[in-house]
Image (cartoon, rainbow, N blue to C red):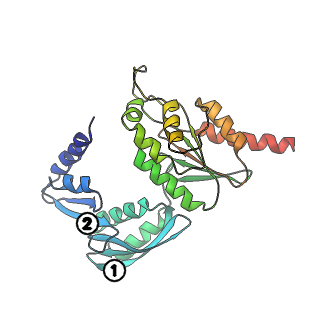
Amino acid sequence: PTAAEYEEAFAGFAARLPRSGLLVVAEADAAALRAAGHTAARVETIGFSPATDWAALDLRPRQGRYRFLLYRSQRLVGQVALAVPGRHNVLNALAAAALAWESGVRGGAIMAGLEAFRGLRRRLQTHLLPGGIALVDDYAHHPTAVREALASVRAMFPGRRLICVFQPHQAVRLTRLLDEFAHSLHNADLLAVAEVVRAREGPPRAHEATACELARRAAELGACVLPEHAPAEVAAAVADRCAAGDVVAALGAAEMGWLKHELVERVRVHRAAG
């Protein structure tokens, strides 16, 4: 219900680690560092500063993917070129390296493992559709993930029009974080908000935020927003507006195969008509 209680949950988790354990923490996350203060285990930090225990330095982005120098305790481990896009995945790579090292894996094997990783389903998973349209499918369902996903897609496809289709997951989450969601969605040229997926929730309650309200808040912040919210209508509206070279980011915890199907079907129909 509150940010303080959210932080307390992680502090409680950290407190359960044994003294012989290891806690890896993002150095730039003040709340995570406070939670780490409750552990008896050894703590190692990850980040983009030379002062961190595991650091990514000299970052060189190329179409959303990063090459960087990996340092442990200010000593060079090696150079890494990630196959997965997103600056947030650099931090994920640092965390993986720290845990691998703790498990007895050393430099060369860590480098090889990180570079061989090709990502997960529905994590910036890219589908190249007929008609020159790219669909990027991502599980992002909270404001931080939405913001990072859109930034990553921008970097992956520079200069191309970006259409975002976001389907909120859980009405209670949308209600509590409505403003945060509205701000996180600004990095798109065109936005569509599909109806909320009421996962593990009962009937709608009074004062719950809706897809329509999120769309209105985003529009107030300057976003260009489509008026449709029913998934079938959203899919049709987005498909009608798509052109060759466009990138569609499908964000949300629920499966969004309905959007991919409509985009592919639109191209098929247009080709048949032409």
Question: Is residue 243 shown left or right of residue 199?
Answer: right
Amino acid type, mark 1: Leu
**Can residue 124 be seen in the rendering of this structure?**
yes
Picture coordinates of residue 225 (x, y %)? 59, 40
Furthest toward the bottom, the residue is: 75
Say if 270 sits above or below 17 in the image: above
Q: How many marks?
A: 2
- The crowd level at tag 1 (other Cα within 10 Å; few <14, some 14-19, many 20+) is some
- The C terminus is located in which quarter? top right
Task: Locate residue 194, reporting x and y percent.
Answer: 55, 34
Q: Which residue is mark 2?
A: 102
**Res. 112 mark:** none
Examine the image and state in which quarter residue 241 appears: top right
Q: Quadrant of residue 94?
A: bottom left
In the figure, is residue 256 to the left or right of 46?
Answer: right
Q: Residue at x 38, y 60 (%)?
A: 92
The nearer-to-camera label among 2 and 1 is 1
Dot 1: what SS? strand
Residue at horizontal 39%, vertical 32%? 175
Residue 1 figure quarter: top left
At 23% across and 45% down in the image, what residue appears? 7
Q: Where 145 falls versus 20 (above or below)?
A: above
The residue pinned by badge 1 equals 76
| As drawn, 92 above or below 240 | below
Residue extending furthest toward the right: 274
